[in-house]
Amino acid sequence: MNAIQGIKGFLGTSLIDYPGKVAAVVFMSGCNLRCGFCHNSVLIHDGEHLEDVGFGELIDGLRRRRKLIEGVVVTGGEPTVHPQLTGLLRELKATGLDVKLDTNGLRPTVLEELLRNRLVDYAAVDMKMAPARYAAFLEGPQEAPARLAETVELLRLSRIDYEYRTTCVPGLVSDTDIETIARLIHGAPAYYLQQFIPTHVEDQKLAERPAYPREVLERFVTLAQPFVSNVTIRNL
């Protein structure tokens, strides 16, 4: 595989992106959602203007760090929109590294193929808000609730490690959203409630909103715990 379109960034070493592992991070462009609170919007709107990271450069970088890293994270943007993702992950697995996939869960057929071919060792799924609200607030598909439910079931039946996470954006994520998501993912190994950071977001109106105080996030934890025992606040 000499060229893969859509690889726009490479971080050689990260201590925070793959739970329990030192990992490299691969950033892919494009997305099938439009989230005003996205911190990587340059990968979505300007991706075609960014220079691709060569596949050979990527693999060489991983091999040079092989004694330092245990895994590689493929994130975005949204990796599953790329038709070459399966081939990329197959090549990454061939390096001997564990592969973590960050996804919004809206392409369960892609995830099913990756799981069937044992190309993912860990999955992190972003649950943005209650699935029924995706079409109105994120330009998401009307089928979002069904697609997310399928992704949840695929992971529930899989043998890989996985997590769900929600960025708690004031005005977009409420008590009802947290409880709805927690009911959907009931029994999941982990659910992370991420603090909203009002910098570098796409929607400037959101940038003017202060983050939720800690007591609100703690209330969210309480609402989710009857369905997911391991609920943790991140980025505080």
Image (cartoon, grey):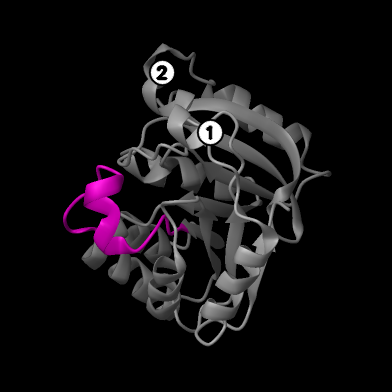
Q: Secondary structure at mark 1?
A: loop
Task: Please give left or right for residue 206 compared with residue 200 in the image.
Answer: left
Taking 80 as reference, is 113 above or below it? below
Q: Who's the residue at 47% across and 59% down the image?
A: 125
The x, y position of residue 146, in whole percent, is 22, 67
Residue 196 included in the magenta stretch of the image? no
Q: Please say whether residue 39 is visible from this viewpoint.
A: no
Q: Position of residue 114 (x, y in %)?
A: 40, 58
User: In the rendering, at what x and y percent does residue 217 appear?
Assistant: 62, 64
Which residue type does callout 2 highlight?
Asp
> What's the amino acid at mark 1?
Glu
For mark 1, does the 10 Å Cα neighbourhood hold few (<14), some (14 to 19), or many (20 or more) residues?
A: few
- Residue occupying image coordinates x 41% and y 21%: 47
Name the residue located 53 percent from the left edge and 60 percent from the top edge: 165
Q: Which residue is mark 2?
A: 46
Report the disc number at residue 208: 1
Badge 2, how many Cα within 10 Å: few under 14, some, many 20+? Answer: few
Q: Position of residue 179 (x, y in %)?
A: 43, 75
User: Residue at point 18% right, 59% down?
Assistant: 143
Q: For the residues marked 2 and 1, what is the alpha-carbon distance in whole angstroms?
A: 24 Å
202 and 218: which one is in front? 218
Looking at the picture, tell me which residue is in the foreground, 102 or 127: 127
Task: Give 207 or 189, whichever is nearer the viewer.
Answer: 207
Q: Residue furthest left?
A: 142
**Which portion, as a residue range, is magenta?**
126-144
